[in-house]
Image: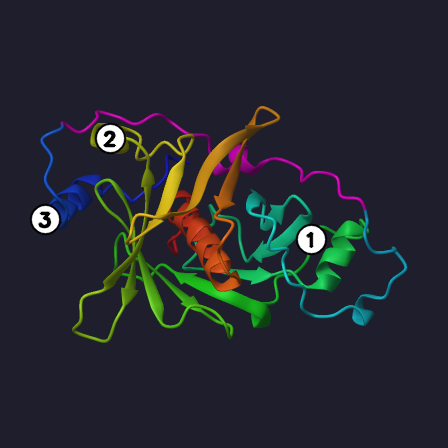
């Protein structure tokens, strides 16, 4: 698997397009970017051992369907198709991030799912489409454009566009037909322009998620754990649940856009 984001041999087209939208730069483009591990290597880790918080003989049907994720936990890591925080598994992805599929979904794990995992009964929980929070699309015939929509009440209304530019990712609100998308967030490397261009594909360098006022809402990176790479994000502590789950969705969508995406 190639570096993130992999945009199907269109760096030149993207650079020309974004050069019109962003301020032009005279800095020469790097000949190549530092390689990053494959997704398989990056996620071939076992989640940390979890002390069971529910007795093994508890009947799953007795547990509530909804468990609020601890708002004090701001660090999240991806293990396979599960997103963990330090307390254990919290969210579930419909596929691995390097799957060549046209849609990726994310849902919040139910208490009964977590009980089964923590009790050691199974780590292969089936993805329940009816509990999907957000769905990311890679539409056919469109290159370098991904769209995210909420599938649950309380999520972000409308549609968001995720697109990689010359230096950073752009997240825009899709307005009504004929109206240009409205800027919402960006995601890119820290530092000066030259570093941002050189390191734009190096996921071992942190990426910051910023709003239109320049406030940092989250920072993500592939960090080392046990000699392997682990996708990790740190969210701002003052985010409400909608923003927390939106940023988690955009994070995994960005990784999916680079590692996999596409229907083949």
Please say whether residue 100 is visible from this viewpoint.
Answer: no
The residue lying toward the viewer, choosing from 95 and 201, is 201
Q: In the image, what residue occupies the spot 51% across and 39% down? A: 231
Decide: is 221 above or below 246.
above
Q: Residues within 10 Å of mark 2 (few under 14, many from 20)?
A: few
Residue highlighted by disc 3: 20
Give the label on residue 138, or none: none
Magenta stretch: give its range.
28-51
Q: In the image, what residue occupies the spot 30% across and 35% down? A: 200
Of discs 3 and 1, which sits in the foreground?
3
The residue lying toward the viewer, choosing from 132 and 26, is 26
* Label 2, label 3: how far apart the Cα atoms are: 20 Å
Q: Secondary structure at mark 1?
A: loop
Whether residue 102 sits left or right of residue 46 in the image: it is left
Nearer-N-terminus badge (2/3): 3
Residue highlighted by disc 2: 192
Decide: is 168 above or below 122.
above
Q: Secondary structure at mark 3?
A: helix
Residue lying at the far right of the rendered structure: 57
Whether residue 60 sits left or right of residue 123 in the image: it is right
Please say whether residue 155 is visible from this viewpoint.
Answer: yes
Residue highlighted by disc 1: 124
* Label 1, label 2: how far apart the Cα atoms are: 43 Å
Residue 253 lies within the magenta run: no
Q: Quadrant of residue 129?
A: bottom right
Give percent across and percent down for residue 185: 32, 54
């Amino acid at each position: 698997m190639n570096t993130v984001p992999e945009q199907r041999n269109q760096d030149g087209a993207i650079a020309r397009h974004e050069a019109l939208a962003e301020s032009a730069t005279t800095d020469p483009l790097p000949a190549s970017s530092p390689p990053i591990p494959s997704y398989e290597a990056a996620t071939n880790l076992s989640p940390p051992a979890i002390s069971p918080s529910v007795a093994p003989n508890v009947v799953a049907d007795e547990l509530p369907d909804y468990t609020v994720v601890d708002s004090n936990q701001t660090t999240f890591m991806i293990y396979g198709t599960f997103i963990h925080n330090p307390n254990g598994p919290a969210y579930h992805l419909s596929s691995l991030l390097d799957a060549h599929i046209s849609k990726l979904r994310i849902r919040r794990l139910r208490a009964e799912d977590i009980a089964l995992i923590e009790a050691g009964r199974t780590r292969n929980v089936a993805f329940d489409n009816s509990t999907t929070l957000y769905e990311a699309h890679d539409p056919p015939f469109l290159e370098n454009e991904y769209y995210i929509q909420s599938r649950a009440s309380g999520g972000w209304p409308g549609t968001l566009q995720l697109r990689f530019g010359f230096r950073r990712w752009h997240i825009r609100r899709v307005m009504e037909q004929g109206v240009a998308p409205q800027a919402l967030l960006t995601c890119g490397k820290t530092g000066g322009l030259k570093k941002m261009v050189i390191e734009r594909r190096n996921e071992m360098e942190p990426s910051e998620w910023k709003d239109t006022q320049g406030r940092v809402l989250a920072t993500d990176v592939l960090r080392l754990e046990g000699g392997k790479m682990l996708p990790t994000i740190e969210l701002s502590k003052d985010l409400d649940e909608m923003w927390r789950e939106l940023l988690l969705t955009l994070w995994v969508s960005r990784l999916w856009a680079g590692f996999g995406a596409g229907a083949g």
